[in-house]
Image (spheres, rainbow, N blue to C red):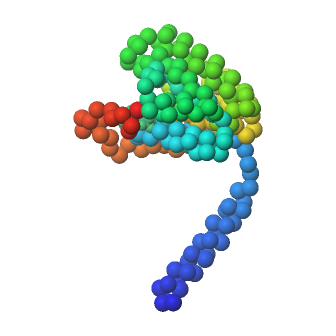
Amino acid sequence: MTEKDERHRIRMQRKKEVVDQKVGAAGMARGLFLIHTGNGKGKSSAAFGVLARALGHGQRAVVVQFVKNRSDTGEEAFFRAQPSVQWHVMGAGFTWETQDDGKDAAAAQTAWEVARQALANPEVDLVILDEFTYALKYRWLDMTEVLAAIAARPTMQHLIVTGRAAPQELVDAADTVTDMTLVKHAFQAGVQAMPGIEW
Ligand code: ATP
Ligand code: MG
């Protein structure tokens, strides 16, 4: 072994000790609350990636889509065919399309009722509340009530919330928060939303 290889081996050995110690210290098992926020692309699609992962473990999931009202997405076509997934598209459409705050708020309330039931159901292993942050941003839902339902959910149930501008109180309540950073997006260069990539 060369001197360089030996130095590398010693460095990796030390690193392994540190990693093993951290892994050993993380012995807790419980349901997690994740938030995917930020202006970059990948919030919803990352949540659906986790959904695929959970289904691979035989878990049962409920997806509630706030704001969105289209039912022709690739993810819906794919996951609806899975018997252990319940898929609810419950938005009234983008706020700049509806231009009707009362209608948006009513849709959010109805969607929240479905979400609340999922969050109270111990048979559900994973809940995804897609584009949920907007329901809080526009004050369609009561923050205190939402935080209480999240806190009271079954111990082993996982929750993923997606949407831009996650409110601080929601971030404070979450376990894992990822801020997707916009570096560049094809839309800025004039490319239309491409099936299979955007929806
Ligand atoms: P995705 O569903 O692709 O993971 P997302 O959930 O991060 O995206 P949303 O804010 O929900 O993003 O936007 C939904 C749609 O807008 C998707 O088609 C997505 O590709 C597109 N999009 C996301 N970020 C941007 C952006 N910065 N500029 C333009 N379009 C975007
Ligand atoms: Mg999204």
Foreground: 175 or 194? 194
Determine the residue positioned at 59% across, 36% down.
160
Q: Percent position (x, y) of residue 100?
A: 44, 10
Up-down relation of residue 76 to residue 183 (above or below): above
Looking at the image, residue 141 sits to the left or right of residue 73; the answer is right
For the C terminus, which image quadrant?
top left
Looking at the image, residue 177 sits to the left or right of residue 17; the answer is left
Q: Percent position (x, y) of residue 195?
A: 36, 34
Image mark count: 0
Determine the residue positioned at 66% across, 39% down.
59
> Quadrant of residue 144 in the image?
top right
Determine the residue positioned at 55% across, 18% down.
108
Determine the residue positioned at 47% across, 39% down.
45
Residue furthest left as drawn: 190
Foreground: 162 or 65? 65
> Quadrant of residue 123 in the image?
top right
Residue furthest bottom as drawn: 2
* Residue 2 seen from this side: yes
Q: Percent position (x, y) of residue 76?
A: 49, 30
Looking at the image, residue 107 sits to the left or right of residue 31; the answer is left
Up-down relation of residue 175 to residue 151 (above or below): below
Up-down relation of residue 6 to residue 83 (above or below): below
* Residue 163 seen from this side: no
Looking at the image, residue 191 sits to the left or right of residue 34; the answer is left
Ligand 1 quadrant assignment = top left
Foreground: 87 or 112? 87
